[in-house]
Image (cartoon, rainbow, N blue to C red):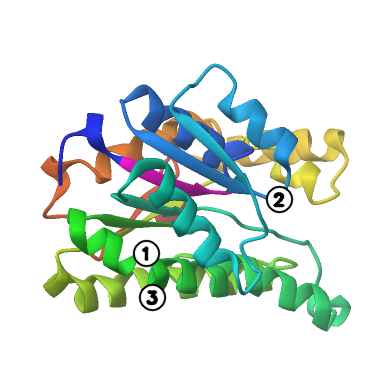
Amino acid sequence: MTNSVEKAVIVTGGGTGIGAATARAFADDGAHVLIVGRNEDTLKETADGHERIRVLAADISDPGAPDAVVGTALREFGRLDVLVNNAAVTGFVALDGLERASVGAQLGTNLIAPVFLAQRALDALQATGGVVVNVSSAGSLGRRAWPENSVYGMAKVAMDFLTRTWAVELAPRGIRSVGIAPGVVDTGVGVRAGMPQEAYDGFLAQMAERIPSGRVGRPEEIAWWIVQLTRPEAAYANGTVFAVDGALSVT
């Protein structure tokens, strides 16, 4: 890959949390970044003060989204070096309360959209020796269960499988595929999913007591790892999913 000054990056779910932190980290590193999300206002908040960040309000689960997203990046930047599949939606519901529409919506955003975004980006990534970064979750690693979050966890397990498979499939084309599995990170996702703020704060405090590192993570910490894994110095990392979770997944 070329140096970071020339790098062009797509980050989905760039309006909040890990996506917003990742977009800013790439921009601060000299990259040009296209952030994608449904809410234009939050995207603009991410881009505020960062002239290298461009905004595209789009639903990545729409069939036409891959062409729109990748096409916009190529028009804006003339190249594509990194695709960060970060966007995700969740819902805390047990099996007996699941509805077909909500399951379909989660899988559409969390799993199906990344597949076709990556597919559409292949030629552009091959031209630059680029990288696909799939953001999954340490909560779905190994033999762990995730009560009341089964659909979200299912999609993240599948994302890890895609990361490994794409690494093998795409290596002959010079494209790497890596994954980041964040642990409990204070992104506000619980509140956006409908959890009261007090309940979300209580959840974070409870989890901090269980995490060996003694605290929950910050979005900027996950963003740092994403940027590092796309550097030329990381070129031998391929097909691996990196857990960044304060050691919770190994307890």
Q: Nearer the viewer, residue 66 or 137?
A: 66
Tell me the residue that label 3 is attached to. 161
1 or 2: tag closer to the N-terminus = 2
Q: Name the magenta segment's main secondary structure.
A: strand
Residues marked 2 and 3 touching at CB (< 8 Å)? no
2 or 3: tag closer to the N-terminus = 2
Task: Establish if 95 lies above or below 179.
Answer: below
Look at label 2 and name its amino acid: Arg
Q: What's the residue at 62%, 57% (across, down)?
A: 88
Tell me the residue that label 1 is attached to. 121
Left or right, 200 with respect to 161, comes to right
Left or right, 158 with respect to 167, comes to right
Q: What's the residue at 45%, 44% (across, down)?
A: 245
In what element is the residue under mark 3? helix
Numbered label attached to residue 38: 2
Q: What's the residue at 15%, 41% (across, down)?
A: 2
Q: Is residue 56 magenta?
A: no
Mark 1–mark 2 distance (CA, rounded to whole Å): 20 Å
- The stretch in magenta equals 8-13
In what element is the residue under mark 2? loop
Residue 203 in percent (x, y) is at 73, 41
Residue 184 in percent (x, y) is at 57, 44
Residues marked 1 and 2 touching at CB (< 8 Å)? no
Mark 2–mark 3 distance (CA, rounded to whole Å): 26 Å
1 or 3: tag closer to the N-terminus = 1
